[in-house]
């Protein structure tokens, strides 16, 4: 049975053009980019080309791109690397950040000698940072480091990053945004976001797993997490993953080229999906806020999210209950908790994140199937909350 894939915020299928560009670098062009011979020179050229493709996609110079092994590493590099180059002070993150921002920020606040004070920016009921509260908190506690994601992986809600960055910069802070869920879905322009650093990851944009980047302002002081041969301007040692970096470059180029068409396609599908879900009595989280066009995070009251996900999978639809990235750590979504969603309703949360391959037929099938499952679950009410 073909399973309709509705979980693009978790990861995406590698695009054919991306795979084709990567393949030579596994075998024919397998060189180490640090080598001086032709194999090495070809690998270095391929990395330089990919660096330019990534840089062009977000409006920066190639020198501002630091390749890492994933978005998690890039986020850790900012939090820990920037903190280590500053005097300890106040670190502000939004309450809905991905665990790879939240955990290193918590670790900074637990240090013995040079501990930082961690502040979580409050969210409103639609899942956006409360700007007035953020401004007051930053006046009360001068920020040194700030990180606020561009689009949330669960709700898809877009944050006013440039406004928050301006606020934080006025206090002299270094500001970062995790733009992983924004790239390929909305315009991501580094200068316009007014941040000092930004994270991107290849596998959310039809590129391979294991390639990502921290984009940095040239003035940002950063200490590396990984020391060694001094790769990536000394900020990320380790032999470069050439095939993955090449794939990341192509994926970035395609993400920008296809942005308008793809955003229009998924937003049409999402509109149809949400009309159908609302007709079934669903609550849609963050619906009144600006959202990336592919994401629908909903709850059908009294139908447990995990139960619905398993039933839908058996019926041929891959959807997520909350954040796939934290499914090793089940429990209530910290994003919905920050939005003050009733915990009983939060247990019913299911996320659908659409991509370029999804079709209107899949959405219609999904709505019919979901209605059928819901009717069945309600009839055998032991399976409901
Ligand atoms: C918003 C966000 N940040 C960070 C990550 C982690 O990125 P990666 O899987 O490349 O480590 C993810 C996805 O898992 C994400 O959605």
Image: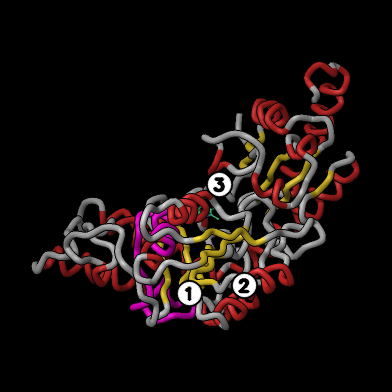
Per the rendering, the mark at residue 256 is none
How would you rate the neighbour count of disc 3 (Cα within 10 Å): few for under 14, some for 14-19, many for 20 or more?
some
Residue ID at (61%, 77%): 162
Per the rendering, the mark at residue 174 is 1
**Bounds of the magenta segment:** 52-79
Nearest-to-viewer mark from 3 and 1:
1
Q: Position of residue 328 (x, y in %)?
A: 52, 35
How would you rate the neighbour count of disc 2 (Cα within 10 Å): few for under 14, some for 14-19, many for 20 or more?
many
Residue ID at (59%, 70%): 141
Disc 2 marks which residue?
138
Give the mark nearest the N terminus, 3 or 2.
3
Q: Quadrant of residue 54?
A: bottom left
Horizontally, is 44 left or right of 207 in the view?
left
Cα distance between the residues tagged 3 and 1: 28 Å
Helix, strand or loop at disc 3? loop
Residue ID at (38%, 56%): 211
Colouring scheme applied when the structure was drawn: secondary structure
Residue 106 seen: yes
Disc 3 marks which residue?
10
Q: Is residue 336 magenta?
A: no
State whether residue 221 is above or below residue 21: below
How would you rate the neighbour count of disc 1 (Cα within 10 Å): few for under 14, some for 14-19, many for 20 or more?
many
Can you tell me whether the CB of the residue at mark 1 lies under 8 Å from the nearest atom of ligand 1?
Answer: no
Helix, strand or loop at disc 2? helix
């Amino acid at each position: 049975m073909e399973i309709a894939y509705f979980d693009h915020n978790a990861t995406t299928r590698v695009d054919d053009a991306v795979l084709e560009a990567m393949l030579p670098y596994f075998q024919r062009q397998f060189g180490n980019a640090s080598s001086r011979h032709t194999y090495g020179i070809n690998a270095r050229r391929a990395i330089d080309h990919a660096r330019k493709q990534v840089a062009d996609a977000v409006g920066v110079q190639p020198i501002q791109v630091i390749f890492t092994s994933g978005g998690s590493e890039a986020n850790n590099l900012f939090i820990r690397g920037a903190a280590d180059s500053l005097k300890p002070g106040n670190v502000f993150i939004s309450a809905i950040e991905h665990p790879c921002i939240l955990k290193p920020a918590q670790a900074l606040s637990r240090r013995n000698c040079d501990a930082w004070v961690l502040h979580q920016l409050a969210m409103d009921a639609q899942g956006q940072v409360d700007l007035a509260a953020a401004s007051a908190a930053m006046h009360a506690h001068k920020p040194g480091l700030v990180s606020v994601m561009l689009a949330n992986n669960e709700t898809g809600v877009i944050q006013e990053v440039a406004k928050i960055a301006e606020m934080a910069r006025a206090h002299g802070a270094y500001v970062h945004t995790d733009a992983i869920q924004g790239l390929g879905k909305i315009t991501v322009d580094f200068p316009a976001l007014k941040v000092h650093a930004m994270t991107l990851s290849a596998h959310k944009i039809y590129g391979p797993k294991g390639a990502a980047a921290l984009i940095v302002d040239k003035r940002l002081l950063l200490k590396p997490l990984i020391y060694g041969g001094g790769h990536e301007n000394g900020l990320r040692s380790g032999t470069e993953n050439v095939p993955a970096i090449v794939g990341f470059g192509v994926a970035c180029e395609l993400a920008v080229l296809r942005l308008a068409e793809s955003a229009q396609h998924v937003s049409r599908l999402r509109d149809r999906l949400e009309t159908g879900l609302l007709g079934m009595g669903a609550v849609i989280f963050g619906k009144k806020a600006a959202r990336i066009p592919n994401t629908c995070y909903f709850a059908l009251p009294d139908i447990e999210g995990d139960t619905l996900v398993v039933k839908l999978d058996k019926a041929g639809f891959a959807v997520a209950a909350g954040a796939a990235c934290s499914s090793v750590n089940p429990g209530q979504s910290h994003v919905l908790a920050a939005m003050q969603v009733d915990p009983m309703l939060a247990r019913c949360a299911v996320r659908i994140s659409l991509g370029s391959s999804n079709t209107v037929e899949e959405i219609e099938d999904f709505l019919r199937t979901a209605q059928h499952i819901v009717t069945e679950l309600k009839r055998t009410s032991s399976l409901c909350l």
